[in-house]
Amino acid sequence: MPRLEDIRNHGKEIHKLMKDTADNIKPDKKSQTWLSYVDYVNGLVIEGITTGIHASMAYLADQISIPYNKQNNYPPMFDVKVDLRDREVVFDPSVQSNARGTGIRDILQKIIDDFISLAIQMPRLDTNSGDYLVEIKDQFQLFGAMQVLSHHFRDIEVATAEFLRQYQGKEFLWKETLAESFQAFLDTGVDPREQEHKKVNDDGEEEEDETFRWMAEKILVGVQTKRPGLDAFDEKITFLTGIREEIAEAALKPAVDIGWLRVNATPLIKELEKTAGQWIAAYTGFLLDNTTREIANIEAFIHEVGTGTLDPPRAAEKKADKERLMRVMAHLRDVKMIKDRTLEEIEPMKQAVMLLKKHQASMPKDAKMMEEDFLVKLENAKTALVEVSERALGPTKEAILPLQTAEAKDIKARLRGFVVKVAEYRQVFQATCPYHVTKSSPEIIATAYATISEYYRKTGELDDESRELNNLETLFDMQKSSYKQLKECRAELCLLKQMWDLISLIDFQFDAWKSTLWDRIDTEQLMQLIREMQTKQCNPQAPQNKEIKSWKAFVALNERVKNMNTILPLISQLHSKFMQERHWKKLMATTQQTIAFNSPKFCLEDLIKLELHKFSEEVTELVEGAQKEAKIETKLNAIQACWDSQVFDFKEYKEVPLLGALDETVEFGEQHAMELMGMLSSKDVDEFKDRVLHWQRTLKTVDSVIGIWVKVQKAWKRLEPIFLASEDIRAQLPDDTRRFEQVDGAFKEMMREAREEPGVVVACTFEGREELLNGFLAEIELCQKALSEYLGQKRKIFARFYFVSE
Amino acid sequence: MAIVSEVDELVKKMKDNVKKMQELMAKWEKPLFDRKMKPLAPEDLEQTH
């Protein structure tokens, strides 16, 4: 840039002038005075640069101030375009900075950077090298100027954004796809072809109004009937035309000045005008095409009927004549069917043409040509259709009437035959179809489906035939037969299929369960599923089962589900841990079936085979019994364990081991005797009866032996010092003393023997012990008796002995 | 007296030189950007200022 070149030269000159000063003064260049002077001049240079930069900035700030430009009536500084990019309206180049650095903001920044480069155009005066950038960057004055520049730039940003806002209502033109939007518009309409058209026939029944079907075949071929009404088209086309006018208005003045920017919108406006035109063409073109096609269809129909009814046959003996008669009659039928509806169509079509006319300014030229033509054509078609119809239904109909009457006779005979055929078919249908098959297996299900398919086919054939006859009835102006029985067959086929779907669904489900191994059967989960079946699919009260609930196949299915529902809780019970082999055997005996309950393959199917639903009470009893038996067994084991550990506690007395305290043993004996009594009264004791009785006997023995034993021991202890230590007694009762001595010896021996095996049960049931003890008791009682007698005598003699105890 | 006048000469010289410098620097106050009185394409501007 030439100006910077000048500035560089100025810099050189300033250096020269400084040198000149130095040359003249010849200073000591290191002296403080000289350095201060250099610093002073350096300061002047900094001031000069700052002032220079500030001046440029202030100037630029004015150039980008909107009011300044307005006051001075300046032409804009930059040319920018407005265009469409990536479905957005944008400035080109952008107002803000952009990635490529081409935005207006970027360009201004470059200019400002150039201003600042003033600080690097001359070497520093003080150091002879480097530049003044550091000082310049700290200048408060320059900050202020930058602020003003930014402020003015923000104004242009706001103004340009405001400019773009005028395109807001037109965004659909570049954001939406025409084809999709137009389709969505068509979809808001209702298609009369998709609706059911009903009318009440002569029997007072509701039946299909065939008019529309015939219309669709003749007049509406290739015509798009799913579309909104003409009002919607009018509204849309008016709206689009308005948009296009707005755009066209903008096109008159494509360049707009915004502050100091000249905005050229030509590229955008051209694009939008083109697009708006395409949108309008889509809507008007659709109406035009649809109307063209429908008019052509009507004309073709008029032609077809007109030529077809011109020359009716006079006789109908030959096959060709008969066929011609049929064709003529078909034309008469068509006319009768659709004439009125077609005449009704003319008015809306005219309206469509009028609508196109209203918007013709927005349409292509060749389309405009067609409109007048259309109105004429429609008027002509109306007249022609009435004419042709009158001729067809008048003279033509009259001409063929005799032939028609003759032909009608044959047809009536056919109709009667068909009524009989349908009635017979209905009987066979009802006898053969699987309404009441109560058994179920994959084979039975397959057969049921095969039968349903077969009768579906047969019913279809009869349906075709009935349609053909209905067609003839229409042709010959006869009342249409409705063949209720065929309708019933059709309806029942659907219900049968539905029922067998349900049967196979549930039976296959049960089959899948059957292979579940015994350990894996989760009855809770299965019952949940069963409950669902009962309340939903199989529920006879459910609306979908209303028709089939009385059919036996359905009843049987429900029975199977119910049985399964009974079986599953029983199976859950059988899972009891108390179930032993003997219980399973008992179950087999009850059900009179054999199952491999020990096999690893033991599964749900085995249990289902048992038909447990018939033995609900027995199973409950069995499982409860098993539980009670287990209780008895546990108690018995406890009793046994207790007695296994009960031992006599021997205490040494005069070198003889005597029985110690027996309270605990006696207490156990009483308690257990009670328990055993209780068990015996339970009906589930059978399995353990022997053991219970054994223990009852054992404890009885123990109780009685202990009783005798204690008596013997007590008596021995009392008599032993009398008989063995008293010489007097020995002398007075020699026999009894001997007797006692014998008992004493045997008793001591028995006691020592008993100590060797101190278990209470063992000791008490030791072979011969009870008898031995009884023997002891008898002998001791004799000794006691003798002693008492002796003492009695003594008392008589020595009265004071009355107070001596025995 | 000679010295005085010599010093006076020197001071004059110094002041002169500073004045000349300030005159040079005054030229920098003319803006470095030149507004054209017709709209430019932004890309054309860079080369012209």
Image (cartoon, coloured by chain):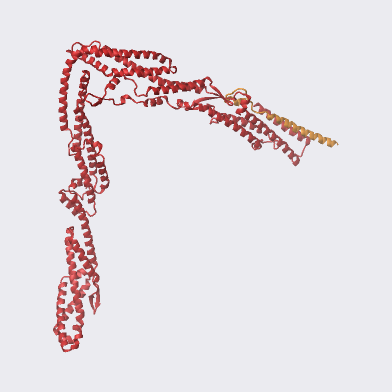
Chain colours: A red, B orange
Q: Quadrant of residue A674?
A: bottom left
Looking at the image, which residue is at 26% across and 22% down?
Answer: A210
Place of residue A575 in the rendered image (x, y in percent of width and height, measured from the top left): 24, 51
In this view of the protein, which residue sits in the foreground, A280 or B6? A280
- A74 to the left or right of A505: right
Query: Is A300 above or below relative to A598?
Result: above
Q: Quadrant of residue A276?
A: top left
Query: Is A214 above or below relative to A112?
Result: above
In this view of the protein, which residue sits in the foreground, A336 or A749? A336
Q: Quadrant of residue A196?
A: top left
How many labels were placed on the picture?
0
Place of residue A300 in the rendered image (x, y in percent of width and height, measured from the top left): 31, 14
Query: Is A466 above or below relative to A122?
Result: above
In this view of the protein, which residue sits in the foreground, A478 or A48? A478
Outermost residue to the right? B1
- A73 to the left or right of A213: right
Place of residue B30 in the rendered image (x, y in percent of width and height, measured from the top left): 68, 28
Place of residue A22 in the rendered image (x, y in percent of width and height, measured from the top left): 76, 35
**Residue A770 visible in the picture:** yes
**Residue A737 visible in the picture:** no
- A368 to the left or right of A589: right
Outermost residue to the bottom? A797
Quadrant location, the C terminus of chain A: bottom left
- A277 to the left or right of A329: right
Quadrant location, the N terminus of chain A: top right
